[in-house]
Image (cartoon, rainbow, N blue to C red):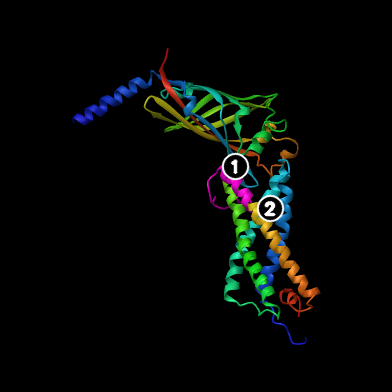
Amino acid sequence: MNFPTPRYTGPAIAAHWVIAALILVAFPLGVYMHDLPLSPTKLKLYSYHKWIGITVLLLFVPRILWRITHRPPAPLPMPAWQHRIAEGTHHLLYLLMFLVPLSGWLMSSAKGFQVVYFGVLPLPDLVGKSEELGDLLKEVHEALNFGLLTLVGLHVAGALKHVIIDKDGTLRRMLPFAK
Amino acid sequence: MKIRTLTLTAAVLMAGTAHAVEFNQVDAAKSSLAFSSKQMGVPVPGSFKRFTSHIAFDPAKPTAASTTLEIDLASIDAGSKDANDEVVGKQWFNVKAFPTAKFVSTGVKALGGNRYEALGKMTIKGQTRDVVAPFTFKQEGASGVFDGAFVLKRMDYNIGEGPWADVSAVANEIEIKFHVVANAATKK
């Protein structure tokens, strides 16, 4: 195992970890904040959560364009079914990376709260204020998030399996400072 | 020729009636009182569903006009159920102790054209402050339509105490918008 493993490109690695970090902050923040009694802190946390989500949405665009125009390194040898699961998980992760923040933005609009990025850039409301739609979108946002949580769990478990059981270079292809 | 005569006659008639007409029958169903707060830079609209207002406004003698406004604070819609429950509480309006807010005019200035300025005293939560509210007046048939807006600083009235005094979360400036329709009645 001394030949160099082909790695993901620098921008792909950067986008992966930056977005992963943003999701890892936004998710627990969302779980924590939604049950808080109304307070200035709650208003602030909601805003931070929305700003992070919009950032993910913004980063998603160049990331997916980069992914389409740059083939990832070929997978290391593994059973076909494992490869299919890995690939399916990746596709769904991309989908949710887009749908989760989008559903949050829609929900915010429906609840009657415009998203103002970093408190200075007002984003357009995607739908009009409607209590029923707001409640529905809350459910959708929640369900999508638990889908995302499941996929991230599967994704991390797969990566760890390659490190611990297979002892191959699959994870190293995506590590920022690996050789 | 005929048209000109008619126009002239109409103008004379209108000028003649203007002296006798005072808009003083407020149509509550057509009037509204709205506001907009800023939460983390997000404009959040709200309104008061119940208020009573008295107006006496003669366009020929605007400086003699007067108005009072009494707002039922519990009728607030602050944008969400959570907010509605919160703002009637002690730290905000404390409606149990201070159920109404009141504005009493002390004078009206004509600014030219259809623009005016109402000066007066606003009392909310036991605090009285001077308020200047610019407005426009428009006659629509037998109705007078008053539209105005001004900025009120919530901390002047202790609206939002304790942790809510943090104006970085909810801005100090609250924009108030009023739209009052009053019908004309002949002066006694």
Q: Chain of mark 1?
A: B
Indicate the position of residue B69 as horizontal and vertical percent values: 56, 24
Residue under label 1: B44
Local crowd at mark 2 within 10 Å, few (<14), some, or many (≥20)?
A: many
Local crowd at mark 1 within 10 Å, few (<14), some, or many (≥20)?
A: some
Indicate the position of residue A149 as horizontal and vertical percent values: 70, 59
Q: Is residue B45 above or below residue A80?
A: above
Quadrant into which the C terminus of chain A falls: bottom right
A159 inside magenta stretch: no
Q: Is residue B75 above or below residue A128?
A: above
The boundaries of the magenta stretch are A115-140
Residue furthest right as drawn: A164
Residue nearest the observer in this picture, A43 or A86? A86
- Secondary element at image label 2: helix
- Amino acid type, callout 1: Val
Residue furthest bottom as drawn: A3
